Image (cartoon, coloured by chain):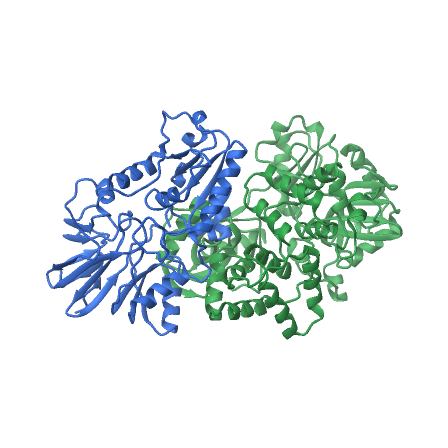
Amino acid sequence: MRDFATLFNAIDQSTKTKVKVAALADYFANAPKPDRIWTIAMFSGRRPKRAVTTTRLREWAAERAGIPLWLFEECYPIVGDLSETIAHLLPPATRQIDKPLAEWINLVRGLGQMEEPQRKEIILDAWDQLENTERFLFNKLITGGFRVGISQKLMTRALARATERDEAEMAHRLMGNWDPATITWDDLIEAEDAGADASRPYPFYLAYALEDEPSDLGVPEDWHAEWKWDGIRGQLILRDGQHFVWSRGEELMTDRFPELARAMDFLPMGTVLDGEILAWGKGQPQNFNALQKRIGRKTVPKKLLQEAPVILYAYDLLEWQGQDLRQTEFAKRRLLLSNLCADLPDDAPVRLSPTIGFVDWESLAQIRQTARDAQAEGIMLKRMASLYLIGRKKGDWWKWKLDPLTIDAVMIYAQSGSGRRANLFTDFTFAVWKGNDLVPFTKAYSGLTDEEFRKITAWVKKNTLQRFGPVRQVTPEHVFEIAFEGIQASSRHKSGVALRFPRMSRWRHDKPVQEANTMDDLNEMLRLYG
Amino acid sequence: MAALTFTEEGIYCPAGDFHIDPWRPVERALITHGHADHARWGMGSYLSTNMAAPVIRHRLGDIALDTIAYGETRQIGGARVSFHPAGHVPGSAQIRVEVAGEIWVASGDYKVEDDGLSAPFEPIRCHHFITESTFGLPVFRWRPQSEVAAGINAWWKACAASGKTAFLGCYALGKAQRLLSLLDPNVGPILAHAAVENTNGVLRSQGIKLQDSLLANADLNPKDHPGAIVLAPPSALGSAWARKFGTQENAFASGWMQLRGIRRRRASDRGFVISDHADWRGLLDAIKATEAENIYVTHGYTDIFARYLNEQGWNAQVVPTEFGGEDAESEAA
């Protein structure tokens, strides 16, 4: 664990990418191989299953620290991280034993089979033999959620450097369905063929947001346009007589969308499609609300399958007849894809996301204005000659989203953030007027600068009316413009509406609280855009 | 009537008709130490320790300032007043006020660890103790100063070895001099930003022993001082002035660096956990040592700290003040 803690400190104590990558590359070249595998797993979000509830961890930590539980609970939102809170509160270790990372992980993995008193004993014992950083990391192993300021991209770069391999190939190797408990370093990193595993997806190519005018992109003939859908980006893989569905977050979702299994009836093996998983009804995509019912469900009851069936709206072909097409121009991939989809019957779970024809940028701008009617968020622009790259790259793929909807709302509750926003008030609840009352209708966390968060934090501290645990009710005084992508009726919210991607777009210093928008305004938006 | 009361202007002694560290203009102000949230401009007259006076004069200019030695007793109206070391910065004091046998201590800001520079904190027995709570949470636990010093010097050495200038961000009064006393001059040259060096000069001329540091102003050529460390206020890190020094690493020295979230928000390369305020244990030990039953909790995690004290059997209450220029987002602490 000590060399892993040293690696973590090196990464954590620098703001420079170069230093972080160098530290990681050094670790990947020298650490024991099982430790390397677990490090890759954790930095790419594959963690051992949580074996202890955080409730128990808090109780045990408070008990060992000799403080009342309420005091622990007060510290947690200020520190902004449970693992760190525990690490700071525990008394110093009484002995220090250095065991390899993989050994600690096996210990954590074994906790699941134990009775609670035994778990407690093992965890208290572990805390007692680790220094502060090691304790923090150990807690991260137990609780999961390993976000340490190293992106998968940087880790891939470090691995490529440590093994003297190509970065793109390394990115491909790390994709998919491998299990750190069973795979070896040699199989994952050194084996000859990166595509050996039938389920392994390709790394997704992501678009940048278009901020300037599209006319800056050049002539329209060089560009392909289609709707930007509001579903789940997914990859459908047909190989070896099986099918696999991956989300962009690299989650295997095959069982969640059983209707996609029928793709095997219509498409040949050796095919990989990139597209959007959407709820489909009445011959067209349904809004995100319909898909929402399916998200988070591991198995789907029959009734829901009928109510909200999904399809893959295909927009790219990554593999055809077993050949990787990513180095083929988009125009050719698209032609192959449309030929492939042309003969599909209406009940096939795969459809072709249609091309939007346009003669000039002005006419495309007008079409974009109708995106909401098409249940789309805007327009995607792809350069005809573009290859299928890895990750978010500027230049060839652009998302040209609709301007968001906005409403002016009053801040009524504040809560402190976590991570690098710990000890700052960053999470707010907003309300609109209904007569003389303020009705809360949304929360928002992002959109302000650090400086603005500092200002509002100082203000919240001085203007707290009441405290409910970590939440503070504040004087209704500040108006913020809330931007959002969509609005839906919702029976789960007191206001009767739910917003999509709400965030603070502006602090309206100019606006007195009485002039914030009303519930009637919100209902009118629901009528127009819901 | 209580010997000390809390008014809109600050802590007030009716028997002596004076205020302690007032935040609005009053006739007569007793000042615990020279930090900006405790020593403010506009008072009719000031009283501070003779050790704190030069810095207060340096900061506030031409003021009517009377001085007193640690431990010396003075009768002001119906109040007996004395100043005692608070260990916060050189010259900092707790102010003891006795009226008709009732003893109050206003401690200003304090720390209990001896930093080797300030007169060490002295527990004063009293009935009523006014305490800060800047770091009044059990997650704040300081390491011994010698350990922090070793960390800073090792970091500096590594910077020097890789040809980088080490910038150490710190508050100009107190923290900067404390850090200066911890630096190992064998590693390389020690430079100081003007704001720091001016304060160094004031303290040196009143007889406080500080090792040599070089003023890093516009005339200084960074190339002449390879492997240097620069003590500078945090606002100067990354400025045009700092960029003259070529490749560099930035560190920040503060109790807040204990929290990873705050350290990352600062976007410093390194954070060293060192504070001139008491940590959780320090606060509790200091309170215990006063043997006071009534505790008044000012600036910091007031609600939480007071609740804990009440649970532990003290009679504690929160007192709103305008102290605390030293929360997580400011430069001090």
Residue A56 against residue B136 in the figure, above or below: below
Where is residue A251? Give x, y as percent: 72, 53
Residue B280 occupies quadrant = bottom left
Quadrant that contains the C terminus of chain A? bottom right
Chain B palette colour:
blue
Residue A16 against residue A264 in the figure, above or below: above
User: What chain is the green one?
Assistant: A
Q: Can residue A153 be seen?
A: no
Where is residue B142? Give x, y as percent: 44, 56
Where is residue A32? Give x, y as percent: 72, 50
The residue under the point 15% across, 62% down is B80
Q: Nearer the viewer, residue B72 or A386?
A: B72
- Return the residue found at the far left: B77
Residue A9 in the figure: left or right of residue A107:
left
Residue A173 occupies quadrant = top right
Q: How many marks?
A: 0
